[in-house]
Image (tube, helix red, strand yellow):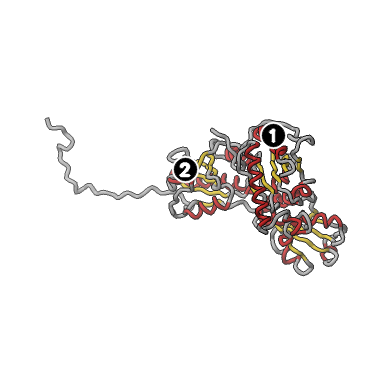
Amino acid sequence: DRYLGFFSLLGCSLVFMVQGFYSASDDVVELNPSNFNREVLQSDSLWLIEFYAPWCGHCQSLTADWKKTATALKGIVKVGAVDADQHNSLGGQYSVRGFPTIKIFGANKNKPDDYQGGRNSQAIVDGALNALHTLVKDRMSGRSGGSDYSRQSGGGGGSKKDVVELTDDNFDRLVLNSGEVWLVEFFAPWCGHCKSLEPEWAAAASAVKEQTKDKVHLGAVDATVHQGLASRYGIRGFPTIKIFKKGEEPEDYQGGRTRGDIIAGALDLFSDNAAPPELLEILNADVLKKTCDDYQLCVIAVLPHILDTGAAGRNGYLEVMMKMAEKYKKKMWGWLWTEAGVQMELEASLGIGGFGYPAMAAINARKMKFALLKGSFSETGIHEFLRDLSVGRGSTATVGGGALPNINSVEAWDGKDGELPVEDDYDLSDVDLDDNFGKDEL
């Protein structure tokens, strides 16, 4: 089997190293949460950035080519590297799910492009020059170039529109009565630290809004104007950040002040307070397509026929799945199930079909790749299966036909035990049976 990552172009073998890959003598710029904003986001240069983990075998193999690329592009394109194992806030901010991941930070630094080319220095250089050509062409045609952050938020931030302006008049309605999670910054316009935080807060607000589907909000209160709010929450210094959750007393935010730190903290709050994803029965094509299109991964179980398990047995399997959906809710994956034999084209496309129930597959619909559960259909077995996928390990294959299969429209399970089909009764009293029936005539 080939080992491929669901969320990266290349998977990683588990080889442990503790030191970083690059030094000051290399042309590769080592990036971290402290210098990323200054070096990359506020820069007008095109950046090519590798997100790596020191234990990743493929990352180790890429190192020599990455250094060669940086030297070849010196003075033309910036080449950087982020130890995303150490600085996971940066990796999380840019949805890095496997290693190595390479991203191109061009005109819009808020939305870098994934590099999809080969992993040798010549291919990487060609890809960088193509991206640079596109950037220059866009600038010549009048489309935006340089850093979007500086234009949108006074230098180095995201769009201010995603930071909710909170006041004495709207605070209770928007924050306390919303039932959702809020991170609220109390600031003063004259405060230097507040000015430094502003672009980080704005960028984090945009990312958090997108990644939590607008379930976690970032707000800001001018405490010099809305002194009633500042007094109510005992604000004594600026900036002060507080966390508001439904039915709980506000608490002080204790995390870092970079956008990556803020995003990571907000996502943790989201996962802690979010309901687990819904477990849906595949009743028609729309259920399958919407779930697999809307989520990065859809986890599908094919359960035994109801006559084989009864309602109690089936509910036991569904309970295991719901526990796993709760455990992995931070991943925001979709969860589906169907009965064996009902969706035969789906089973065939996943190589299940006919035996081995219950079975489970995880589909990445964007790549049309899937992986099968090889272990037991249990909390332990499924956890090991999904854990391996989430770190880029596991055997995968292409979905049969290269597309989601046809799906039958069926009625939802009624929650009851199955019933054997009723056969017609035959009255044999009127049937004339020959006494010699069944005897051989010599």
Kindly state the secondary structure of the residue where label 1 is placed: helix
Q: Which amino acid type is shown beneath numbered disc 1?
A: Thr
Along the viewing direction, whichever of 417 and 193 lies nearer the viewer: 193
Along the viewing direction, whichever of 429 and 238 lies nearer the viewer: 238
Q: Hey, which quadrant is residue 204 in on the image?
A: bottom right
User: In the rendered view, would you say 274 is above or below 368?
Assistant: below
**Disc 1: which residue:** 63
**Disc 2: which residue:** 400
Whole-percent x, y for residue 190 in the image? 87, 61
Mark 1 surroundings: few (<14), some (14-19) or many (≥20) residues within 10 A:
some
For the residues labelled 2 and 1, the Cα–Cα distance comes to 36 Å
Left or right of residue 99, residue 186 in this image: right
- Considering every residue shown, the one lying at the far front of the view is 140
- Considering every residue shown, the one lying at the far left of the view is 442
Along the viewing direction, whichever of 46 and 41 lies nearer the viewer: 46
Whole-percent x, y for residue 349 in the image? 46, 43
Q: Which amino acid type is shown beneath numbered disc 2?
A: Gly
User: In the rendered view, would you say 146 is above or below 51?
Assistant: below
Residue depicted at x 67% and y 49%: 112
Whole-percent x, y for residue 264 in the image? 72, 49
